[in-house]
Amino acid sequence: MTTEPREHSHQPTLVEDLLLLLFQPASGTIAGENTLFYVLGGAVLTDLALGDHLTTEARGRVRSVEGHPPSDDLLRPAWDYLSAKPKGVQTALAAIGPPLRAPVLDRLIARGDIDQHPRKVLGLFRTTALREGGTGRRARLLADVRQVLVEGTQPPTRIAALAALLSASGTLPQFHSEIPWTSSVITRAKELERGDWGADAAAQAVTRTVTATVVNSAIAAITVLPRS
C-alpha cells in the first residue's frame, strides 16, 4: 500500500535530507543503523546553526540563541535542551539523537519521499517494508552531493553540511555506484568534515564552526561503536 503524500507546512529539514540519503532503495533499509542517532542528532544541531538558532562557546560547547527558537517541531526539542545551559557536543548528540529516527521517517513518509507497503514474512506475519517514493527528491539530493564530492563544485552551505554529515556517518563506501569511493572523493569529504567548504568565510563562519565541531564529535563517538 502506497502512502499518499500529505501537505506539510515546513520545508524539509537537514535531518530529513540526511535520513532520506541514508535510505537504500534496493534493500529498503537505512545505512548505518547502529550509529544512526549520532548523525541524525548532528544534522539537527547543524540545522539549528544554519538557522542562526545555535552558536558555539568555549571548549567546543554549543548553546541555543536566546529568544530565537526554530519553528519546526523536529528541531525545537534540541533547542529547548540547549537553552538551559551550554553542553558539550557529544553530550548533546547522545541526548537528542536517539528519539529522532521514528519522527523523521514519519515525516519522509508523509511527504511521499518514502513509501510503506505491507508484506508477509514466512507467509504468516504481517509487517511493513519501505521503498522509495515517487517524489524524486532522494535522487536530486544524491546528485547535489555527487557534484560536490566527485565534480568538486562549489557547494551551497546546506549541501556542504549534508555531504559532511554523510561522510561522518561512515556510509559513503556504500554509495560507490553513484559516488565512486576514490582518493579524491575521500580527500574532499574530509575537507568538508573540517568545515573547509570554500564558501564565504564571514557569512558562513558560525555554521561552518558548528558543523565541523558536530561532525568531528560524531566521528569520535561513532569510531568506538560497531558498524552495521
Image (tube, rainbow, N blue to C red):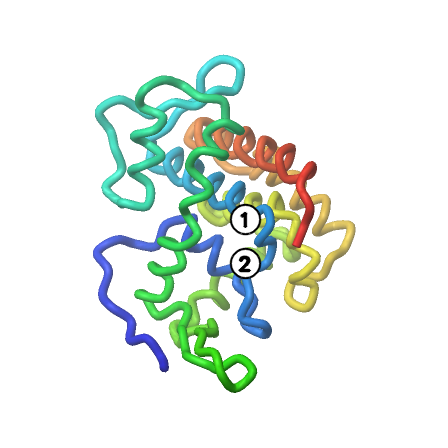
Q: Tell me the tag on residue 15.
A: none
Q: Residue at x 56, y 38 (%)?
A: 198
N-terminal label among 2 and 1: 2
Residue 41 versus residue 9: which sits nearer the camera?
A: 41
Q: How crowded is mark 2: few (under 14 residues within 10 Å), some or many (20 or more)?
A: many
Q: Do the residues labelled 2 and 1 touch (CB within 8 Å)?
A: yes
Check the image and report above or below for 219 versus 139: above
Q: Give the image location of residue 215, x and y in percent.
A: 56, 36
The picture quadrant where one finds residue 6 is bottom left
Check the image and report above or below for 207 versus 102: above
Q: Which residue is drawn at 56% across and 39% down?
A: 197
Q: Residue at x 27, y 45 (%)?
A: 73
Q: On the picture, is 186 further left or further right than 21?
A: right
Label 1: which secondary element: helix
Q: On the picture, is 130 further left or further right than 2?
A: right
Q: Tell me the tag on residue 36.
A: 1
- The total number of labels drawn is 2
Label 2 or label 1, whichever lies nearer to me, is: 1
Q: Give the image location of residue 164, x and y in percent.
A: 57, 44
Specify the farthest residue to the right.
Answer: 183
- Regarding residue 107, the answer to whether it shows in the image is yes
Check the image and report above or below for 20 versus 187: below
The picture quadrant where one finds residue 109 is bottom left
Q: What residue type is labelled 2?
A: Leu
Specify the farthest residue to the front.
Answer: 124
Which image quarter is the C terminus in?
bottom right
Disc 2 target residue: 22
Q: Give the image location of residue 221, x and y in percent.
A: 62, 34
Report the Cα–Cα distance between label 2 and label 1: 9 Å
Which image quarter is the N terminus in?
bottom left
The picture quadrant where one finds residue 118 is bottom left
Q: How crowded is mark 1: few (under 14 residues within 10 Å), some or many (20 or more)?
A: many
